[in-house]
Amino acid sequence: MSSLIPILKISTYIQIFLLLSRSIYMRKLLPVVLLLSLLFSSIAVSAQSGDMTSDLRVNDNGVYRIEVIAYKFNFSIIDLNNVDYLQNQGMSLQDARNQSTFYNVLHHLDYGRAIIINAKSGDVEHGLLIDELNVNFDLKPPQGNNTYGPELSRQSTLPTTDITVIAYCNIFCGVDHSSMYFEMQVGNGNSFDNSPIQAFGDWRIWTLFLAFAIATAAVIALAMAKPRFLLDEEEE
C-alpha cells in the first residue's frame, strides 16, 4: 500500500495542474488562488512529514549519550551510542567516531528522553551552557601533553514539547565566540523562535519556495499553450 502513495501524490498534482490551467484560461482567479494554496500546502506537508528519525541512537537503557568537544569556534558532538554500535559491527574506533560526529544541529530528539552529556575542551577555556537541561560547564583547557582538558558530565532529561534547545559557549574564547553554539531540536524543534534571522537560511524554506515557483510557472505555461481539452471547451 505504501508503494502506491507516491503514485497517488503525482496523480493528485496532475489533476491540480489541469484544474489550474482551465481556471487561468477561463480567467477565474478565485479557483487559481485556492488551488495554488492547496498545492503549496500539500508540498509543505510532504516536506515536513519526511524522515523524522532522531540523529542520535539510544542505548539498551533508552538513554542518549553524547560527547561534546569545544574548539575555537565550534562544538563537535559525538553520538557515543552510535560509536559503540559501529565498533560492534567491526568498524575502527576512529572511523566510528568520524561517522558519529555532528556540528551544528541534532534533529528530532525524543520527547522527555534521558541524555548524558560529557564535555571537554580541545584548546582554550570554554563554557557550555544549556539552560533547558540545567547544564553549565566551565571547560578548562588541556594541560601538559594532554589532548583535552578535564571532562565534565551530567545526565539530564529533554523537554516534553517541540522546542529547539540552544547550547552555547558562555565564556569568551576569542573573536568568533558569539558564533559558537549548536541546536538540539526536540521533536520538530522550533528554531524560528530562537533565531528569526536564521530561518531565512533554512534550506526547507527555499525548497518550498522553489517548488511553489516551479509549479506556478508550469501551470501558466500549460494554460498559455491552450491544451486540447481547453480548446474543445472554447469551441462549445
Image (tube, rainbow, N blue to C red):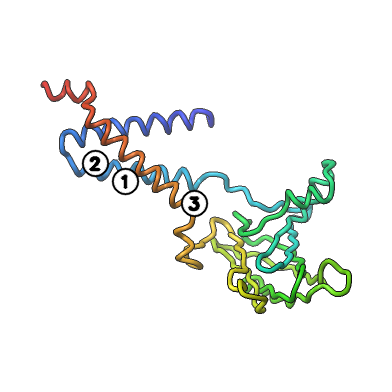
Q: Quadrant of the C terminus?
A: top left
Amino acid type of disc 1? Ser
Report the residue that reaches farthest toward the right. 145
Report the residue that reaches farthest toward the left. 236
Amino acid type of disc 2? Val
Q: Earlier in the sequence, mark 2 or mark 1?
A: 2
Q: Residue at x 88, y 69 (%)?
A: 145
10 Å neighbourhood of mark 3: few (<14), some, or many (≥20)? few
**Residue 85 as seen in the image, left or right of residue 157:** right
Residue ID for mark 3:
203
Give the CA distance from mark 2 to mark 1: 8 Å
**Residue 231 as seen in the image, left or right of residue 203:** left
Question: Considering only vertical position in the picture, is 11 above or below 132?
Answer: above
Q: Is the Cβ of the residue at disc 3 closer than 8 Å to that at disc 1?
A: no
Question: Considering only vertical position in the picture, is 125 above or below 194?
Answer: below
Q: Residue at x 31, y 46 (%)?
A: 37
Q: Is the Cβ of the residue at disc 2 closer than 8 Å to that at disc 3?
A: no
Question: Considering only vertical position in the picture, is 143 above or below 118?
Answer: below
Q: Residue at x 13, y 25 (%)?
A: 234
Amino acid type of disc 3? Trp
Number of numbered discs: 3
Q: Quadrant of residue 70?
A: bottom right
Q: Secondary structure at mark 1?
A: helix
Residue ID for mark 2:
32
Residue 37: give its label.
1
Q: Secondary structure at mark 3?
A: helix
Give the CA distance from mark 2 to mark 3: 27 Å
Residue 24 at x, y = what percent?
A: 20, 36
**Front residue of this view, candidates 5 and 141:** 141
Q: Which label sits in the foreground, 3 or 1?
A: 3
